[in-house]
Image (cartoon, rainbow, N blue to C red):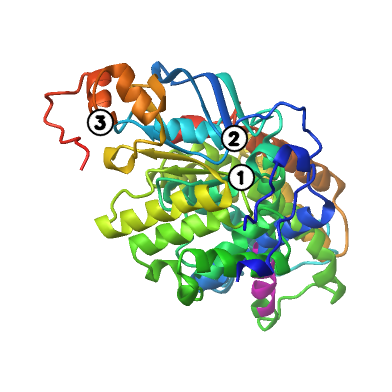
Amino acid sequence: MGSAVTAKPQGDGFGLAQYARCFKGIVWRESLRYWHQRERFVSALVRPLVWLFIFASGFRSVLGVSIIPPYDTYVLYDVYITPGLMAMIALFGGMQSSLSMVYDREMGNMRSLLVSPFPRWFLLTSKLAAGTAVSAAQVYAFLLVAYFWEIEPPSPWGYLSVLPALILAGLMLGALGMLLSSLIKQLENFAGVMNFVIFPMFFASSALYPLWRVQEGSPWLAFFCELNPFTHAVELIRFALYEQINVLALAVVLGATVVFLAAAIAAYDPSRGMLKRREGS
Amino acid sequence: MSFYPPDPEAASGQHTGVISPALDIAGVSHSYGKRKALDNVSFGVRRASFCVLLGLNGAGKSTLFCLITRLFAAQKGTIRIFGFDVNCAPGEALRRLGVVFQARTLDLDLTVLQNLSYHAALHGMSAQETKLRAGFVLDQVAMTGRAHDKARDLSGGQIRRVEIARALLHQPCMLLLDEPTVGLDVKVRADILKHVRGLVANESIGVLWATHLIDEIEPGDDAVLLHEGKILDHGNAAEVAARAGVPNIAAAFKRLTGIAGEGTSWDLP
């Protein structure tokens, strides 16, 4: 059978088509892995739905939300927290990617990726893009369920206009997860991420309550919330659902994405990064 | 016939007239904190040769593999694959390299074919190339019948064979294998060793085979003796033994490392 295959001398560097194949392969592999772990998809949906159907319903009459942009009228509490829950899906998706990378490193799969001749920044960015695509799909599944709960954007175009915001938020949180994965030595240490990253980021944000209410209770906490990039991811999504752009949120999310991704790429750099300290002999 | 580029340097237009070795390691040192894992390691692997990197557990073999594959960079020294420095031209160096790590690196949730397709994508191969090459390399390792089985359903020996097939998928000119036969039974070990030796003879691939199993060396092989991060000697196995004044490489290793009398059973069969 060997005679059917001919030797092909390889030239210098890779062409665009080869980069595209590599990107497609990484996205395909991540999607396939996700398909094999369908329970992850369900659990990623259950979490925000519990918040929406139980928490938000319970607090609907307790927590009033005044008219603040982008809303031009009073909204129900469950409408208010929906963008926060969408961002929550991206947050957990990013951290789940981080967990997968630590797991891959422990199992050895990560080596298959890192010994590819393509530049490491490209490999990591492709992996990030794949994770973002998966988390965006989860958000749309969540919106579909929410629709039947009569929670929807003011116009159907909101479903489309929110997509760039979801991608940006997903990239930012995925890049953060990637950075964290380079810092976590063992899978067992991942619980710390829940306590020190996910919970503080989620609760110290505008996901569950508007910042003016936080300001009333604690100006310092409100200040901290404003510094939290997750707050800006939530606001970016909130405004995008209403077909508006929150410029400050956009700038912060873009800036944080660049910083987190650059730090993650540096952390995985063979000569400068943390990986060499993790591997040992 | 060989399916591999006959001269990678010529293929890439980088030919300088000097035939560089498949692998050239010069003055490489690496430490983990204060612990020195490799100390001024230098040796080469000739093209189309079978070279055994022999060392006890903890000698620094895996560290050296991590440096060659650029999982992390050497703190000192240079590593060249067919003349390409892995730090300055990692893409050119790594595309000529096939690797089988000591730890299993197949994705157990994917099928054999999916694992190969993923690897092919990581080397920019087209779907058509992948299909042809996957069929060929699986046939080489007698795993065609398991192509659609999940990796987790394979035995340890079968996983190793698939990993070797995967390492050959992109037509590398140099193959690194880090303790590929550890944990396998005698028959499977022998089969894998025979197959890899066949690649050297038939496909002109340079092989660096790291092991602590001395019976995997034949007198005609090149051998590199690594101990506590240092090269004790390297060259043709018979010549290394002669230089040490002993009849075979096992005795040479014992003498050079001073491990004789520690209860090891390192004797050639």
Q: Chain of mark 2?
A: B
Question: Could you tell me which secondary element the residue under label 1 belongs to?
Answer: loop
Q: CA distance from mark 3 to mark 1?
A: 29 Å
Of A10 and B120, the residue lying toward us: A10
Instruction: Give how far across and how far down residue B29 sits, in percent.
Output: 49, 18
Is there a contact, CB below 8 Å, between mark 1 and mark 2?
yes
Q: CA distance from mark 3 to mark 2?
A: 26 Å
User: Residue at position x 87%, y 64% from top?
Assistant: A243
Q: CA distance from mark 1 to mark 2?
A: 8 Å
The first of marks 3 and 1 along the sequence is 1
Question: Could you tell me which secondary element the residue under label 3 belongs to?
Answer: helix
User: What's the residue type where badge 3 is placed?
Assistant: Ala
Q: Are marks 3 and 2 on the same chain?
A: yes
Q: Which residue is mark 2?
A: B22
The answer to whether residue A49 is above or below residue B188 is below
The answer to whether residue B77 is above or below residue A65 is above
Q: Which residue is mark 3?
A: B250
Q: Chain of mark 3?
A: B
Would you say A22 lies left or right of B34 here? right
Q: Which residue is mark 1?
A: B173
Question: Could you tell me which secondary element the residue under label 2 belongs to?
Answer: loop
Crowd around label 3: few <14 · some 14–19 · many ≥20 (10 Å): many
User: What's the residue type where badge 2 is placed?
Assistant: Ala
- The answer to whether any part of residue A101 appears in the image is no
